[in-house]
Amino acid sequence: MKKNRKVSILLLCTMFLLLAGTVPAAAGEQVTISGTVNAAYQIITDDQQAYDVAESEKGDEVVEMIGRKVKVSGTVEEQDGAKVIFVTFYEVVEE
């Protein structure tokens, strides 16, 4: 009986650790991108990848910079087939 209990606890702990490792990946991937802000509230990178800018205090500041090149850090998620960046930091890139 004690052996079964130890095995059950070990399995439970293993499952918990495996699930805990997958949560950050599901929440989004932290990235830094550079690109030009367009009028559609997107950042278009040099390799033509489009990132929709999520609504937030920082995101709202970024989308006001239409036509300017920015460097943005944040969390990226897939939403309806589009990449959406939740901006945590940005800076204007002077060319």
Image (spheres, grey):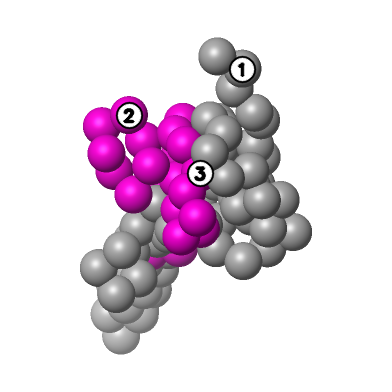
Rounded to the nearest angstrom, the CA distance separating label 2 from label 1 is 15 Å
Asked if residue 48 is positioned above or below residue 8 in the image, the reply reads above
User: Residue 10: horizontal and vertical position, in percent?
Assistant: 34, 66
Name the residue: 25% across, 32% down.
Answer: 47
Q: Quadrant of residue 93?
A: top right
- The residue identified by callout 2 is 46
Name the residue: 60% across, 52% down.
Answer: 63
Under mark 2, the amino acid is Asp
Under mark 3, the amino acid is Val
Between disc 2 and disc 1, whose residue precedes?
Answer: 2
- The residue identified by callout 1 is 94
Looking at the image, how many numbered discs can be counted on the residues?
3
Residue at the outermost top position:
95
In reply to whether residue 32 is colored magenta, the answer given is yes
User: In front here: 92 or 85?
Assistant: 92
Q: Secondary structure at mark 3?
A: strand
Question: Disc number at residue 37?
Answer: 3
